[in-house]
C-alpha cells in the first residue's frame, strides 16, 4: 500500500471586505473584493493545498478569531492580506496578528499578498508547487 502524502496547509488571514475601507481602491466594492478572495482561496485549493480563510473585523474580535484559527491545526503557510498591512491605522492589529502567527504557528512560512488577486502567488513563493 502506497503512503499518502498529506497536503500542505494554508491559512489566509485578512480583513472581511464588509469592514474594509475601499475608498483607496476605485472600482472595488465589497462584493468584488469578496469574489477576488473566494477565487484566490479556490485557486490555492486547486494547487493541491488544504486552505482555510480567516476573515476578521477591524479589531473587536480579530485577535480571538485569528487565535482560534491558528490553534485549529498546524499550518505550513500563513498569508496575511494587504488590507491588514497597508492602512497605517491598522498597524497595531497587524502587529498583533503577526505575533499570534509567530507564537502559535512557529513552523509556518509567513507570506504577504499585495492585493486580493495575488494570494495564490504569495503561497507559492513560500511553499512552491505541491508534489
Image: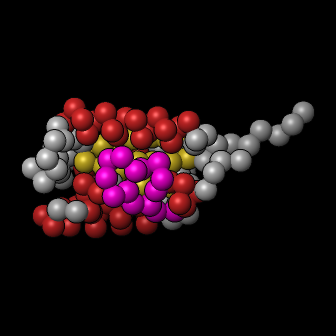
Query: As displayed, is residue 100 above or below residue 6?
Result: below
Query: As displayed, is residue 108 above or below residue 72?
Result: below
Query: As displayed, is residue 115 above or below residue 87?
Result: above
- In this rendering, position of residue 129 left or right of residue 41: right
| Residue that extends furthest to the right in the rendered view of this protein | 1
- The residue stretch that appears in magenta: 109-122
Residue 92 position, x and y percent, is 20, 66
Residue 69 position, x and y percent, is 41, 46
Residue 23 position, x and y percent, is 9, 50
Which corner quadrant of the image does residue 113 belong to?
bottom left
Q: Nearer the viewer, residue 130 or 103?
A: 130
- In this rendering, position of residue 128 left or right of residue 28: right
Residue drawn at the location 30% of the way across and 43% of the way down? 55
Residue drawn at the location 13% of the way across and 54% of the way down? 24
Q: Name the quadrant of the N terminus.
A: top right
Q: Nearer the viewer, residue 115 or 20?
A: 115
Q: Is residue 104 visible?
A: no
Residue 49 position, x and y percent, is 57, 42
Query: As displayed, is residue 27 above or below residue 94?
Result: above
Instruction: Please say whether residue 120 is one of the residues in the magenta stretch.
Output: yes
Amino acid at each position: 500500500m502506497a503512503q499518502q502524502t498529506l497536503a500542505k496547509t494554508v491559512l489566509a488571514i485578512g480583513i472581511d471586505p464588509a469592514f474594509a475601507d475601499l475608498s483607496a481602491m476605485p472600482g472595488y466594492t465589497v462584493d468584488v473584493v469578496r469574489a477576488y478572495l473566494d477565487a484566490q482561496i479556490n485557486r490555492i485549493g486547486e494547487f493541491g493545498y488544504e486552505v482555510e480563510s480567516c476573515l476578521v473585523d477591524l479589531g473587536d474580535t480579530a485577535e480571538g478569531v485569528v487565535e482560534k484559527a491558528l490553534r485549529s491545526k498546524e499550518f505550513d503557510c500563513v498569508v496575511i492580506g494587504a488590507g491588514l498591512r497597508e492602512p497605517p491605522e491598522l498597524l497595531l492589529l497587524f502587529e498583533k496578528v503577526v505575533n499570534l502567527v509567530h507564537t502559535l504557528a512557529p513552523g509556518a512560512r509567513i507570506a504577504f499578498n499585495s492585493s486580493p488577486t495575488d494570494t495564490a502567488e504569495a503561497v507559492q513563493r513560500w511553499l512552491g508547487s505541491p508534489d
